Image (tube, rainbow, N blue to C red):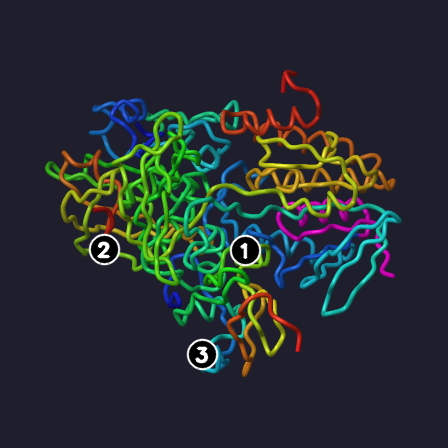
């Protein structure tokens, strides 16, 4: 959910665009990170751990921790907490360590 | 190869203040900032800052961030590179960075590392469930992106970050189930605690998370009380339904570059971990390499700004700039730091710095 | 205990209250700040000289209640939102409590809102008499609430329906 009214802040979200999460269309804004747009759509599982296949989500949101790695336009290990949304982008849940195609 | 007199790594409160101070004395400065908007964590601080006028007290963090950025951008001596990540510092003084998918080499005469800190995690079963975040992450999500993290939050940690983020969650219309704190006392400023308490949020000291649960994402947590030896008291378990848990259990200095540059490091618990050994003017054991802000010991942003200024002045002076003014400016910055750290809340930091400087037991 | 719960005790509060006599005279600031922290904007906000200058930035604010005219400038200048104005001269039965407020939506004048004490417990519904902006940059509002005289030292927050907490 996006905040509509805030006592202190005014959000500049940029242009509304569509991108794809595991093939499904999701709405996002060009000034938002992929992680933020997915959260706004209620998507919190971003990947699965390499060994035990446990669900992985956002942890630090500023590019420190690598918990949010996803496959973006075929490229694995993208920190979606700091990568901005672009129209038509293909974002996929990452399973394990990911491999370069 | 890009040449500059002073390279500042990190465009947060410390880095921006370091750049301004050095440029004002006449030095050429380049700032590397990995984010697209400099300001560091100030970009999400919607609350008013403490301190005095000299540290912009009464202004909100976001306003201070904008002001510091304007200050560097209006100074022709400062160049700001956003979306640029520093990768390494080499023996010959070359610094490498990634910008726009390109590998760039920089040759600075002085380096100021102001990389800040990272949020710590906490050990308990299922602590990796999506829905468990660093408190700062939730602050970024809510105050930068304008996205709420969920419906009901359990805040773990009653230091300043835990208390402030709880208040900001309420401002964003999100329910805060409780703030729990393992220590027997609230660690943050009590005025922050009172603000959320009078909004109806319980603060439970001597409490910790026993375990989290949920199917794929967080659904709740079992919390329990701790005895005076910090051991769980059986039978005191409570089930808190929450789809979000925020961990506000401290920060660790982001010191990778300091280690890599060969700075002598020392573990100082009061400063939140391993920090570079440095002198009073913030120069590390690698000559010409300075540190400022949380990377040299986790503290409030007010102190980070003053440390940045001190490092900037000192680096510029070492290059021969501001010989007449700089010593006075250094003395003023040192006096401000002393003042900010002089009260009971600054005691821990003072002890840590004394240990770091090898002056344990000396009068502050 | 304040340091365990975030709720100031009667003993804490006693130290910062003006005399009964001063309270009855008219609006006066009450600074509910009990901890030594490096912070001094309140001393600079007060143009009456009622909030005394600090020797050390970590000092707890000290008031000269005789100099305070209840102007309320300090309310929105305190970064801790710890200052309130109480006016017991408002009417025989009611007092005005002025409260710093940073939430949406803003209450409207004449609206009945829930008054909360320092623990966030509901004390009743009270009428909003005035809503003052702290300015475009400051962004903290001051809400004037008419409460029964006997509750003027208890009501310290408001709630406009919406989210409730606790259990």
Check residue B83 in the rendering and tell me which mark sits there, or answer none: none
User: C21 left or right of C4?
Assistant: left
> Which chain contains the residue that carries disc 1?
B
> Which chain contains the residue that carries disc 2?
C
> Which chain contains the residue that carries disc 3?
A
Residue at 39 percent across and 52 percent down: it is: B245
Question: In the picture shown, does residue B145 fall above or below B157?
Answer: below
The residue singled out by tag 1 in the image is B43
Q: Quadrant of residue B329?
A: top right
Q: Secondary structure at mark 3?
A: strand
Residues indicated by labels 1 and 3 sit on the same polypeptide chain: no
Residue at 53 percent across and 53 percent down: it is: B63
Give the distance between the C-alpha atoms of the residues marked 2 and 3, in whole angstroms. 34 Å
The residue singled out by tag 2 in the image is C160
CA neighbours of label 2 inside 10 A, class few (<14), some (14 to 19), many (20+)? some
Residue B14 belongs to the span the image colors magenta = yes
The residue singled out by tag 3 in the image is A26
Pick the front one: A67 or B312: A67
Residues indicated by labels 2 and 3 sit on the same polypeptide chain: no
Q: Quadrant of residue B312?
A: top right
Answer whether residue C109 is visible to the viewer in this image: yes
Pick the front one: C17 or A58: A58
Question: In the picture shown, does residue B152 fall above or below C151?
Answer: below
Give the distance between the C-alpha atoms of the residues marked 1 and 2, in whole angstroms. 29 Å
Disc number lying in front (1 or 3): 3
Identify the magenta region. B1-28
Residue at 66 percent across and 48 percent down: it is: B115
User: A41 left or right of B43?
Assistant: left
Q: Quadrant of residue C136?
A: bottom left
Disc number lying in front (2 or 3): 3
């Amino acid at each position: 959910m996006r905040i509509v009214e805030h006592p202190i802040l005014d959000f500049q979200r940029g242009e509304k665009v569509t991108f794809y999460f595991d093939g499904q269309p999701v709405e996002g804004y060009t000034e938002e990170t992929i992680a933020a747009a997915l959260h706004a759509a209620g998507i919190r599982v971003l990947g699965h751990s390499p060994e035990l296949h446990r669900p992985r989500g956002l942890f630090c949101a500023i590019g420190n921790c690598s918990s949010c790695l996803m496959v973006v336009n075929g490229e694995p290990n993208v920190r979606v907490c700091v990568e901005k949304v672009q129209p038509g982008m293909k974002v996929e849940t990452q399973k394990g360590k990911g491999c370069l195609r | 190869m890009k040449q500059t007199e002073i390279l500042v790594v990190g465009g947060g409160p410390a880095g921006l203040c370091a750049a301004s101070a050095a440029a004002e004395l006449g030095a050429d400065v380049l700032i590397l900032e990995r984010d697209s908007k400099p300001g560091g964590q100030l970009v999400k601080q919607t609350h008013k800052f403490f301190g005095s006028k000299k540290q912009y007290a009464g202004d909100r963090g976001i306003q201070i961030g904008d002001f510091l950025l304007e200050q560097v951008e209006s100074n022709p001596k400062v160049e700001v590179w956003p979306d640029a990540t520093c990768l390494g510092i080499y023996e010959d003084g070359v610094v490498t960075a990634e910008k726009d998918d390109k590998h760039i080499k920089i040759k600075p005469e002085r380096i100021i590392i102001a990389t800040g800190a990272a949020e710590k995690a906490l050990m308990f079963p299922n602590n990796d469930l999506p829905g468990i975040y660093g408190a700062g992450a939730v602050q970024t999500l809510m105050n930068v992106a304008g996205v709420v993290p969920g419906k009901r939050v359990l805040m773990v940690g009653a230091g300043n970050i835990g208390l402030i983020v709880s208040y900001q969650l309420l401002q964003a219309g999100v329910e805060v189930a409780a703030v729990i704190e393992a220590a027997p006392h609230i660690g943050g400023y009590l005025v922050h605690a009172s603000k959320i308490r009078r909004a109806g949020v319980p603060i439970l000291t001597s409490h910790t998370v026993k375990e989290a649960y949920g199917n794929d994402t967080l659904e709740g947590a079992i919390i329990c009380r701790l005895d005076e030896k910090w051991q769980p008291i059986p039978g005191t378990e409570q089930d808190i339904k929450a789809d979000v848990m925020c961990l506000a259990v401290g920060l660790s200095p982001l010191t990778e570059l300091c280690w890599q540059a060969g700075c002598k490091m020392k573990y100082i618990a009061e400063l939140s971990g391993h920090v570079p050994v440095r002198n009073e003017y913030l120069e590390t054991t690698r000559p010409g390499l300075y540190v400022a802000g949380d990377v040299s010991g986790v503290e409030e942003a007010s102190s980070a700004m003053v440390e940045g200024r001190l490092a900037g002045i000192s680096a510029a002076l070492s290059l021969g700039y501001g010989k007449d003014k700089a010593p006075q400016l250094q003395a003023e910055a040192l006096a401000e730091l002393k003042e900010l750290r002089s009260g009971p809340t600054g005691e821990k930091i003072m002890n840590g710095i004394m240990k770091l400087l090898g002056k344990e037991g000396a009068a502050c | 205990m304040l340091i365990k719960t975030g709720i100031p005790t009667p003993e804490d509060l006693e130290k910062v209250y003006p005399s009964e006599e001063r309270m009855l005279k008219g609006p006066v600031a009450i600074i509910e700040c009990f901890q030594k922290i490096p912070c001094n904007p309140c001393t600079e906000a007060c143009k009456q000289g009622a909030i005394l200058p600090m020797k050390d930035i970590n000092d707890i604010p000290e008031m000269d209640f005789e100099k305070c005219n209840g102007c309320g400038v300090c309310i929105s200048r305190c970064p801790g939102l710890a200052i309130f104005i109480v006016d017991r001269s408002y009417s025989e039965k009611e007092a005005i409590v002025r409260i710093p407020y940073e939430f949406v939506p803003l209450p409207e004048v004449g609206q009945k809102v829930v008054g909360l004490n320092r623990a966030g417990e509901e004390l009743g519904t009270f009428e909003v008499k005035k809503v003052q902006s702290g300015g475009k940059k400051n962004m903290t509002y001051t809400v004037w609430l008419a409460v029964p005289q006997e509750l003027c030292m208890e009501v310290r927050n408001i709630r406009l329906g919406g989210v409730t907490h606790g259990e």
